[in-house]
Image: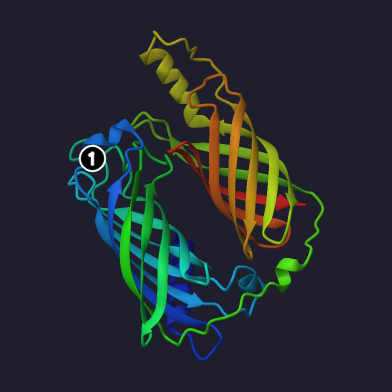
Amino acid sequence: MKTFVCGLLLMFFGVLSAQDTTEYPAIDINYLRSNVLLHSPELAHLITGHPEGFLASVSIKTNGSQEWEAVYNYPDYGGYFLFQDFRNPMLGKAYAVGGHYNFYFLQRQLSVKIGQGVAMVTNPYDKVTNPKNTAFGSKFMANTALVINYRKENLIDNFGFQAGLTFTHFSVGRMKSPNTGINTIGLNLGINYNFREVQYRKIDTTLAKVKFVEPIKYNMVFRGGVNESPVIGSGQKPFYHISAYADKRIGRKSAFQLGAELFLTTSDKDYIEYRAISYPEEPIDPDTDYKRIGLFIGHELFINRISIEAQVGYYIYDPAELDIEVYDRVGMKYYVSKKIFAALSVKTHGFMAEALEFGLGVRL
């Protein structure tokens, strides 16, 4: 957490101190009005109004000084601050900070913001004072923001406007129960300001025409962390997820993956025993093996040293059958070198998070 906050502060100070370079800062502020998505019946009593808030971003406008900037049509990168009032006394309010990328399409009139950060909520679950909040098991959690906007810049001097759709996600990744999480989707309307006149650039197609050739690469990843079973108060236990897979680059941006992994989730071991004792009518033995093995396919989007990863898997060995057979993972990687990477990902079953994973891997 301290490393993340320090990195975020450095990014903001870099934005604010930008001088006469090819890259320059910009800001945008959006008003949000949303609906809570009912992805679980447990959330019905928490949906009583339309969440409102605002999203403020500080960005650096790239200008092609690095290869990846031209490949991705000169995106922006920076930091954001998000505030949402869920209009429900049990949920309270949320404050989030994080980093983002803005990608542009349709002659830069369509922008897609992808943000990931950490959030603090004002009214998490408490067995005495707030027992009905099954969405937020902890005061601190992960936040994801996705914003798709129609965008016009420099309409009046350096001011412009944007409008579109916003999706937000708050979850603790089952690091602590309860953890149904909250997803919202709604409309946004806002203004943007560039600290310089926008320099419209012609898209560089040279790199897109260059054939990218790379042999099949073999990866090993160790992911770990702590989580808690669905039983509130059962305690956090460590988990270990070990993956082996091959990937094949099909161009500068993309690679497809195919692999297998072993899941050692120790909280499941206790949960199996709890289910066997508390629900004797269920056909589950307390000595059932808690280990699982899965096969998965995936896709990795390479940006610069950072890449975005998405995987879908199926359990071929799962004696306890505590979850559905299909699982998925979404995350980010940071390549420390060409062969070594760090990873942060969320493993879920549909909309239900199982683990917030911290990983270290090698690509050979």
Residue 155 position by quadrant: bottom left
Does residue 56 appear left or right of residue 99 in this picture?
left
Q: Residue furthest bottom?
A: 20
Which corner quadrant holds the N terminus?
A: bottom left
x, y (%) of residue 356? 48, 45
Tell me: residue 22, above or below residue 7: below
Residue sitting nearer the eye, 146 or 280 = 146
Q: How many marks?
A: 1
Residue at 66% over, 45% down: 221
Residue 231 position by quadrant: top left
Does residue 257 appear left or right of residue 14 in this picture?
right
Does residue 207 appear left or right of residue 292 in this picture?
right
Tell me: residue 162, above or below residue 222: below
x, y (%) of residue 116? 45, 58
In this figure, which residue is indicated by the disc labeled 1? 46
Crowd class of label 1 (few under 14; some 14 to 19; many from 20; radius 10 Å): many
Residue at 71% over, 51% down: 362
